[in-house]
Image (spheres, rainbow, N blue to C red):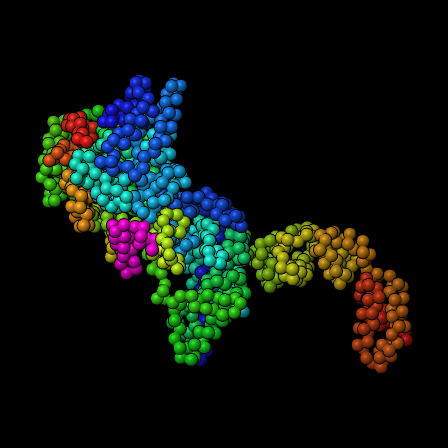
């Protein structure tokens, strides 16, 4: 029997507001423990929460970017559970009335565009962080009260790859809108997954498990692959899937049981009595709509229509707001969009991935890239040399024209000079000449390579090709 | 001097016939003298003298000081004061020192108030006799064998015994008005949202409200002037203009429509209480007020609604007392769950545990709709009924407490009997309305309280009627201590 997976995601993103959700403490990351706290975010007796308006602004922005309905009448609720990093032993969140609902994101699957539904987005407070040091457990409350949005999808994804694509697209949108800095290593973007399997074609859902602790796109994909296989194997063996929460163990490459359904909390949600209802008007929402930037999908469409980029290129370049900005800057300076795109898709992304860097980290500018491309187009340097100049430019941030000049990399186009090198190489390689005469045309390639080498790559490749053939025929 | 009112002390200070230092010393002496009998205070701040001296300096320099400047007062021990303990009369907070001032404390300090101590209460404000304090039993100054009422029993007893010129308490279901009634003083619960709750340790957030205990109605107006008003630190505080409440004193009551809800004078109300109220109401007729019988049948459900809503909120509000960050942590625990269980089992008293269990139950899945949600619906009905009543009358009068002060232990073992002490006061909290309790007379030498309920933000109208009745009765009650 063939099985298919049913996957839904729950994503927590820390909002990039300056201050916390219910007090004026800063949200800055990485400061000394318990230095960004006050009676409110420490949950001291008598302290009361007051909602930070910009948290609502940010959440509305996320909602609009994710095509959601913005709900104008909502309220905060308490989620009750005991845990040492929760200073009040309840979390102030939203339950029955999320701020945003019924949205979607479109992803490009192999079968075409697929719409993944977003059930809801609500605002809530983050907890502190427990640190375990030997016998002792310590708690840092700097993160307590940092604003979060929780984004819950519909169970619309059918493979780990789709889940990963969704999550990547979501991250990209959140970065475009500057709603969150999405730093997964700092925990400002976190993802949990609900997954079940069922016979292909079935319309009923199987029993699901919840998977936590997936700290990268790769981890999400791997954890889901593991869990789906585990569930399918269990069903094939005639076992029952148990509704439970599991944790992804990166080192072991397995999901491990955290708690069963029976141990699940009864959160006893009820409306937060320390706060008033949150009422929005159209003006508030429209004001935020006016601040919306161009989102990846719109940008992609424009790149295809305006610049004639292939969909594949447009897709990759628009994944990152900064990369797209770099691309557009280069195009504006003056250059063939497709050539610029080729460079970005090739050399630029290759080196960024190798060095695990972002476009914003590089030393060279869009102008430098355009100059480099024009050096090739003018025939001053060959493509091969240009790739070397690019690495130099990446390392030092120097002007490519200067690099070419300083290193004497200007292309040799003097026919006599090239012919001289060709003849020298032919003299040194009599065997290749013999091979050629015996019909082994492969020898030509070898000779060309040797000539390029002898010219330190500077000889014009087309001329080298032509002259090698000419001189060979003469022998 | 102990039995002068705050406004009389204010006048003496302004005429420079006394100094704040003298008044404060006298108050501290008085506490020293009688509090071993009354047990109103959990802690007395001997260093309050310093604050008094500051006021004297200002007066000597000819500065204009506010009405409450230099006058000794004290606060219920669930209101946070920077650098002082706030225990809520609970073992679990026995060692908690607040790092910040409640908004009311800030406002009192800005008004030059001299805060002389922390007052006893039922643990976490849960109770009607102050017997639930983990630390001491406060006695009724009129009869030391009897309770002062609760939960703000210390606040009421201190004013009645001349141990402070006024005090602050909190009222969730009657915790200001009922002890005021039993101790023969004025106790005012403002409209929900009038006074900031920031720094008041929450019992039931949607019902709690801070208010004053005073010797007379004029003093209540002065204290309300100081503490009312929107606070940005409390989302539930309301931005309604705070008038000078003293302008409502000495008003004619001619044509004021007063409703007497039949249900509040029926079964369960002691005859002695009824008799004193009837006398006061008769005087009102002489003052040309219009007296009208009204019906508030939904009020009979208020107590049930109250115990569901207040306990539900309390079960969540009190979750933070877990021995992790502050307060008392139990010894010997093998893991965090045991730490929670032991700290909370040892730290909370019986009544607090009872309410936490009640509230946890009412909020649990499967019961939420039947209890919590239903209670919210009935709350709306109670609100609507009061709104309708206020279309016909300006104010409503009822007994504050169905009986005079009862003896220690009389109701302590029977929670239901104890809960009935609040039958006349609870509906007011459910509706979020303002109300006052003023002395109406004595029954068997024990004070009887009269409750006046007003429409939302009509504290001024309440003051006018209360002041009129106070003048007409001119009781001047004093205990024999």
Query: Residue A33, can we see it?
Result: yes
Instruction: Residue B53: give x, y in percent of width and height.
Output: 37, 25
* Relative horizontal placement of residue A83, taking residue A323 as reference (left or right): left
User: Magenta-highlighted stretch: main secondary structure?
Assistant: helix
Nearest the eye: B428 or A37 = A37
Q: What residue lies at 24% left-to-right and 46% top-to-bottom?
A: B132
* Front in this rendered view, residue B378 or A91: A91
Residue B201: image quadrant is top left
Tell me if B208 is positioned left or right of B182 in this view. Answer: right
In the rendered view of the protein, which quadrant contains the C terminus of chain A? bottom right
Residue A108 shows in this picture:
no
Q: Residue at x 53, y 62 (%)?
A: A216
- Residue at x 14%, y 32% (from the top left corner): B441
**Above/below status of B60 relative to A447:** above
Residue A313: x and y, percent? 61, 62
Q: Nearer the viewer, residue B299 or B267?
A: B267
In the picture, the quarter occupied by the N terminus of chain A is bottom left
Q: Is residue A127 magenta?
A: no
Q: Where does the magenta region start and end? A: B342-369
Q: Position of residue B366 (x, y in %)?
A: 28, 61
Position in image of residue A278 (x %, y %): 37, 47
Instruction: Assess whether residue B356 is covered by the magenta stretch.
Output: yes
Numbered marks: total: 0
Residue at the spot 30% in from the left edge and 25% down from the top edge: B23
């Amino acid at each position: 029997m063939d099985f298919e997976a049913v996957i839904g995601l729950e994503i927590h993103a820390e909002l990039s507001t300056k201050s916390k959700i219910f007090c004026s403490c800063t949200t800055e990351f990485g400061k000394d423990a318990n230095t960004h706290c006050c009676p409110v975010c420490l949950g001291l007796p008598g302290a009361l929460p007051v909602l930070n308006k910009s948290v609502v602004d940010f959440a509305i922005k996320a909602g609009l970017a994710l095509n959601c309905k913005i709900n104008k009448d909502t309220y905060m609720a308490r989620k009750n559970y005991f845990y040492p990093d929760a200073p009040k032993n309840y979390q102030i969140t939203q339950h029955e009335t999320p701020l945003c609902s019924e949205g979607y994101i479109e992803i490009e699957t192999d079968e075409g565009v697929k719409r993944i539904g977003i059930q809801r987005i609500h605002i809530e407070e983050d907890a502190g962080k427990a640190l375990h040091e030997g016998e002792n457990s310590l708690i840092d409350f700097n993160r307590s009260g940092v604003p979060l949005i929780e984004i819950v999808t519909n169970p619309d994804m059918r493979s780990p790859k789709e889940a990963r694509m969704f999550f990547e697209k979501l991250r990209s949108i959140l970065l475009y809108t500057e709603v969150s800095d999405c730093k997964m290593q700092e925990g400002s973007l976190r993802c949990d997954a609900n997954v079940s399997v069922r016979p292909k074609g079935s319309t009923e859902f199987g029993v699901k498990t919840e998977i936590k602790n997936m700290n990268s796109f790769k981890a999400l994909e791997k954890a889901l692959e593991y869990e789906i296989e585990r569930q399918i194997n269990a069903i094939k063996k005639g076992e029952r899937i148990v509704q439970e929460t599991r944790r992804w163990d990166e080192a072991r490459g397995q999901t491990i049981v955290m708690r069963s359904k029976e141990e699940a909390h009864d959160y006893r949600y009820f409306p937060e009595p320390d706060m008033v209802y949150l009422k929005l008007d159209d003006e508030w929402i429209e004001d935020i709509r006016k601040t919306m930037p161009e989102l990846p999908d719109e940008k992609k469409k424009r790149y295809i229509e305006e610049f004639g980029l292939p969909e594949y290129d447009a897709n990759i370049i628009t994944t990152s707001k900064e990369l797209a900005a770099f691309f557009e800057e280069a195009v504006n300076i003056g250059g063939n969009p497709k050539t610029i795109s080729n460079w970005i898709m090739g050399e630029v992304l290759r080196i960024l991935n190798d060095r695990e860097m972002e476009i914003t980290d590089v030393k060279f500018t869009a102008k430098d890239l355009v100059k480099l491309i024009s050096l090739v187009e003018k025939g001053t340097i060959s493509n091969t040399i240009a790739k070397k100049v690019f690495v130099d430019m990446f390392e030092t941030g120097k002007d490519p024209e200067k690099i070419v000049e300083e290193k004497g990399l200007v292309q040799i186009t003097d026919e006599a000079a090239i012919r001289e090198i060709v003849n020298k190489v032919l003299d040194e390689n009599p065997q290749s000449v013999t091979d050629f005469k015996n019909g082994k045309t492969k020898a030509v390639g070898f000779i060309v390579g040797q000539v390029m080498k002898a010219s330190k790559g500077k000889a014009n490749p087309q001329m080298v090709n032509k002259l090698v053939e000419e001189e060979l025929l003469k022998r | 001097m102990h039995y002068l009112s705050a406004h009389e002390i204010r006048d003496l200070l302004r005429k420079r016939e006394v100094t704040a230092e003298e008044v404060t010393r006298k108050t501290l002496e008085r506490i020293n003298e009688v509090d071993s009998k009354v047990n109103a205070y959990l802690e007395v701040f001997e260093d309050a003298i310093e604050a008094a001296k500051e006021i004297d300096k200002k007066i000597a320099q000819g500065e204009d000081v506010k009405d409450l400047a230099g006058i000794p007062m004290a606060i219920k021990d669930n209101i946070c004061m920077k650098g002082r303990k706030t225990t809520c009369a609970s073992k679990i907070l026995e060692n908690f020192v607040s790092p910040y001032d409640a908004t009311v404390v800030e406002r009192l300090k800005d008004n030059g108030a001299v805060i002389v101590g922390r007052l006893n209460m039922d643990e976490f404000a849960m109770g009607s006799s102050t017997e639930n304090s983990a630390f001491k039993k406060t006695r009724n100054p009129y009869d030391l064998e009897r309770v002062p009422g609760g939960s703000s029993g210390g606040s009421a007893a201190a004013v009645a015994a001349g141990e402070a010129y006024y005090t602050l308490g909190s009222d969730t279901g009657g915790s200001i008005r009922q002890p005021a009634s039993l101790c023969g003083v004025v106790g005012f619960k403002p409209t929900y949202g009038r006074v900031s709750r920031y720094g008041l340790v929450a019992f039931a957030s949607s019902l709690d409200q801070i208010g004053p205990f005073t010797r007379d109605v004029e003093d209540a107006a002065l204290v309300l002037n100081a503490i009312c008003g929107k606070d940005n630190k409390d989302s539930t505080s309301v931005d309604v203009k705070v008038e000078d409440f003293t302008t409502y004193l000495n008003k004619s009551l001619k044509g004021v429509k007063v409703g007497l809800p039949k249900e509040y004078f029926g079964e369960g109300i002691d005859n002695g209480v009824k008799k004193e109220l009837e006398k006061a109401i008769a005087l009102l007729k002489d003052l040309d007020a219009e007296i009208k019988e009204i019906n508030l049948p939904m009020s009979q459900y208020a107590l049930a609604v109250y115990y569901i809503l207040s306990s539900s909120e309390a079960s969540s509000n009190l979750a933070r007392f877990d021995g992790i960050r502050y307060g008392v942590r139990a010894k010997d625990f093998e893991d965090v769950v045991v730490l929670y269980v032991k700290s909370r089992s040892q730290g909370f008293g019986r009544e607090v545990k009872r309410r936490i269990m009640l509230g946890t139950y009412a909020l649990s899945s499967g019961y939420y709709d039947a209890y919590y949600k239903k209670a919210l619906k009935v709350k709306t009905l109670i609100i609507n009924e009061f709104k309708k009543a206020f279309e016909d009358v300006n104010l409503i009068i009822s007994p504050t407490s169905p009986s005079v002060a009862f003896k220690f232990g009389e109701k302590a073992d029977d929670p239901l009997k104890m809960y009935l002490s609040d039958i006349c006061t609870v509906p007011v909290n459910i509706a979020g309305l303002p109300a006052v309790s003023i002395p109406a007379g004595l029954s068997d030498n024990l004070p009887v309280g009269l409750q006046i309920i007003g429409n939302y933000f009509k504290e001024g109208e309440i003051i006018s009627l209360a002041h009129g009745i106070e003048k007409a009765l001119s009781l001047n009650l004093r205990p024999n201590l």
